[in-house]
Amino acid sequence: MRCGISVSTNTPSSRIRNHCPNCLTSRHTTMREPRTTDGACGGRMQPISVAVLRGGDWTLIQRCTGCSELADDHIETDDNQLLLIRLAVRPLAQPPFPLEHLGALWAAG
């Protein structure tokens, strides 16, 4: 994990943990049976976003720094809530256009 803390593989919901609850990173592996992994590239899976599933559950979106593969992982109750919110609002805080354009649209409407 990026932050270096020791993390249990068990989660509060009894799933197998695939990412650090503190920094939300993990190693790129492919899970087979519980507690065994197939080797993937071994790169660091960096959190890049969150997504909301149809049932309302959030999932963490990660990108491998080694091979750029995308993956998703369940968000757990003990995950870093501040970091999750920062990931969720990043698109609103950094839009792909100048924020001044919103003022012009508002005034024209």
Image: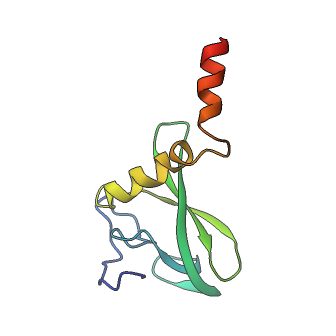
Display colour scheme: rainbow
Between 37 and 60, the one nearer to me in the picture: 60
* Residue 39 visible from this viewpoint: no
**Residue at x-position 71% and y-position 80%:** 67
| Quadrant of image for the C terminus | top right
**Residue at x-position 41% and y-position 55%:** 84
Between 41 and 33, the one nearer to me in the picture: 41
Q: From what the image shows, is residue 59 above or below residue 56?
A: below
* Residue 72 visible from this viewpoint: yes
Indicate left or right for 107 with 85 as reference: right
Between 10 and 84, the one nearer to me in the picture: 84
Give the image quarter of residue 48: bottom right
Give the image quarter of residue 11: bottom left
**Residue at x-position 41% and y-position 70%:** 16
Instruction: Indicate the position of residue 43 as horizontal and vertical percent values.
Output: 60, 85
Give the image quarter of residue 104: top right
Label count reads 0
Instruction: Indicate the position of residue 102 as horizontal and vertical percent values.
Output: 61, 28
Instruction: Indicate the position of residue 68 as horizontal and vertical percent values.
Output: 70, 74
Indicate left or right for 40 with 44 as reference: right
Residue farthest toward the top in the current orientation of the protein: 109
Q: From what the image shows, is residue 17 above or below residue 59?
A: below
Between 19 and 67, the one nearer to me in the picture: 67
| Quadrant of image for the N terminus | bottom left
